[in-house]
Amino acid sequence: MDMAFDVNSDVTDEALLVAYGNGDRQAAAMLTMRLTPRVVGFSARMLGGDRAEAEDVAQEAMLRLWKIAPDWRQGEAKVTTWLYRVVKNLCTDRLRKRRGVDIDSIDEPADDAPGVVQGMIDADRAAALQAALTRLPDRQRIAVSLRHLQGATNPEIAEVLEISVEAVESLTARGKRALAAILATKREELGYGED
């Protein structure tokens, strides 16, 4: 019993998950198209830029989402909040297993942006941000990544981290200050010098 869903429709993630839980495969396809790019991006930032491993985490997280779909209770949590919490836990487990690997040595993927010089500058900036993010404590990295790179709200982040909104605000502020301090010595090198 598939319902006709338009990719750009205003159907909520929760409604799509419930529809999938009731047997609608088209709802699952639409939800996958919506959520997978965000989950892969968040996973990649958590895992130091390892895109292949991030895709594995995203696949595992989405499989877990499909498993709980029949039992999903609307209104208890947002699908994205639940999914980011699962991704955070999966990434944390992977990072614990590979603590001996130098995350900073992983190359950033090439940038497709027009202009070779701008592409190199953007890649250097992204690599510097990624390297700086990996130096933050786990909870600060998660809070900053979710808030400023994924666009999650403080209440959503509080649910993912299972802490208060005030604690999220504190983590985010400390994380931003730490990032600024880490990157301060690289301003000129990254093309942010005073002209």
Image (cartoon, rainbow, N blue to C red):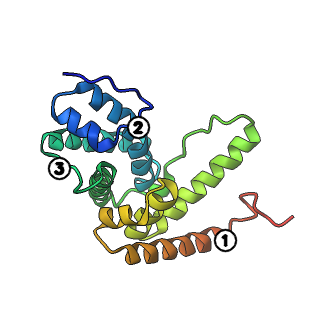
Q: Nearer the viewer, residue 125 or 28?
A: 28
Q: Secondary structure at mark 2?
A: loop
| Label located before the other in sequence (2 or 1) | 2
Q: Please name which of the two marks, 2 or 1, marks the residue nearer to the observer.
A: 2
Residue identifier under label 1: 184
Q: Say which residue label 3 marks.
A: 73
**Relative vertical location of residue 89 with respect to residue 60 in this rendering, above or below:** below
- Compared with residue 103, is residue 176 higher up or lower down, i.e. above or below? below
Q: Secondary structure at mark 1?
A: helix
Nearer to the camera, 38 or 137? 38
Q: Which mark is residue 78?
A: none
Q: Which of disc 1 and disc 3 is earlier in sequence?
A: 3
Q: Is residue 135 left or right of residue 122?
A: left
* Element under disc 3: loop
Image-based side of 118 in relation to 125, left or right: right
Q: Amino acid at mark 3?
A: Arg
Whole-percent x, y for residue 26 in the image: 28, 25
Label 3 environment density (alpha carbons within 10 Å; few <14, some 14–19, many ≥20) = few
Circle 2: residue type: Asp
Circle 2 sits on which residue?
Answer: 10
Q: Are marks 2 and 3 in contact (CB under 8 Å)?
A: no
Residue visible at 47% across and 71% down?
A: 172
Question: Which residue is at the front of the view, 150 or 93?
Answer: 150
User: Crowding at label 1, few (<14), some or many (≥20) Cα neighbours within 10 Å?
Assistant: few
